[in-house]
Image: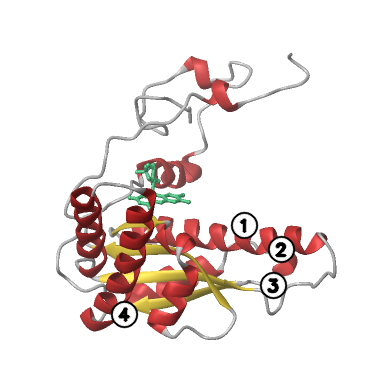
Amino acid sequence: MITASTSSTPGAGGTPDRQGSLDGTEEEEPARARPWYELVSGRRSIRRYGPAPVPAAVLRRILTAACWAPSAHNRQPWRFAVLTAFAEKDRLSRAMGERLRADRLADGDPREAVERDVARSYARITEAPCVIIIALDMADMDRYPDKRQRAEHMMAVQSTAMATQNLLLAAHAEGLGACWMCAPLFCPQTVAEALDLPKGWQPQALVTLGAPAEPGKPPSRRALENVLWRPDRG
Ligand SMILES: Cc1cc2nc3c(=O)[nH]c(=O)nc-3n(C[C@H](O)[C@H](O)[C@H](O)COP(=O)(O)O)c2cc1C
């Protein structure tokens, strides 16, 4: 039975959690679905990696899986910039670090703490064997002259997030670790300029990828009942 639990990994073999069940149905998931549930609940954000490069064929499979995500109007607005060379990762993380330093100092944060965070961010990006910048491009989305454009842009954001989730799950299925980092959202122009991204690409996220050098933080999720509203039940 797949359940939502705050303390254990849900899915086949997990501890049954009646609190998370719908209608108290205790039916087992079909055997064919079990590997998928295990995959989804077993993925963790991995933030440290071994030095081995990600093989090109694996990378291609992962990115292809990302492209199988659903998207609004099937316009597939996701774009990916793949960085494996140190020089590219170094250029990107230095540029992002400068921006982070400026923002944090302007916030009035202590310089020592700021420098620590800048150094940590630099290490996380440059030490990952592979870094993928996730961007979106509005070129093929519909255009509106009014506030509907905001919804259209949001649909591109949502579609791109779905592709990124596919990417994370595919990486996990391949035995790799990955972590979504939101930093590009705070400095999209800096990222676009540092990498000379194609015109129109709007950086949304950065995913680090490599052989896991840690198990990730223990899983935790809110119980399903805490995020579920069923009008018919009150
Ligand atoms: C939109 C989004 C932004 C995130 N940004 C960061 C980030 O900047 N740094 C980081 O270490 N993890 C980031 N994460 C990963 C989350 O911290 C992680 O998914 C969450 O703590 C649950 O852990 P799990 O992925 O291991 O299940 C982000 C995840 C998402 C979906």
Q: Closer to the observer: label 2 or label 4?
A: 2
Q: Closer to the observer: label 2 or label 1?
A: 1
Relative image position of residue 84 (x, y in whole percent): 27, 78
Mark 2 element type = helix
Where, by quadrant of the figure, is residue 213 drawn? bottom left
- Please state which of residues 211 and 188 is positioned toward the viewer in this rendering: 188
Cα distance in 3D space between marks 3 and 2: 6 Å
Q: Amino acid at mark 4?
A: Ala
**Residue contact between numbered discs 2 and 1, judged by CB atoms under 8 Å:** yes
Query: In the rendered image, which residue does mark 1 sit on?
Result: 158
Q: Amino acid at mark 1?
A: Gln
Q: Amino acid at mark 2?
A: Ala
Dot 4 surroundings within 10 Å: few (below 14), some, or many (20 or more)? few
Cα distance in 3D space between marks 2 and 1: 8 Å
The dot on residue 82 is none
Q: Closer to the observer: label 3 or label 4?
A: 3
Instruction: Give the mark, 2 or 1, whose residue is nearer the N terminus.
Output: 2
**Residue contact between numbered discs 3 and 4, judged by CB atoms under 8 Å:** no
Query: In the rendered image, which residue does mark 3 sit on?
Result: 75
Q: Is mark 1 within 8 Å of ligand 1?
A: no
Whether residue 28 sits left or right of residue 233 in the image: it is: left
Query: In the rendered image, which residue does mark 4 sit on?
Result: 56
Relative image position of residue 123 (x, y in whole percent): 19, 63
Q: Residue at x 67, y 58 (%)?
A: 154
Which quadrant does the C terminus fall into?
A: top right
Mark 1 element type = helix
Relative image position of residue 145 (x, y in whole percent): 85, 70
Q: Amino acid at mark 3?
A: Arg
**Residue contact between numbered discs 3 and 2, judged by CB atoms under 8 Å:** yes
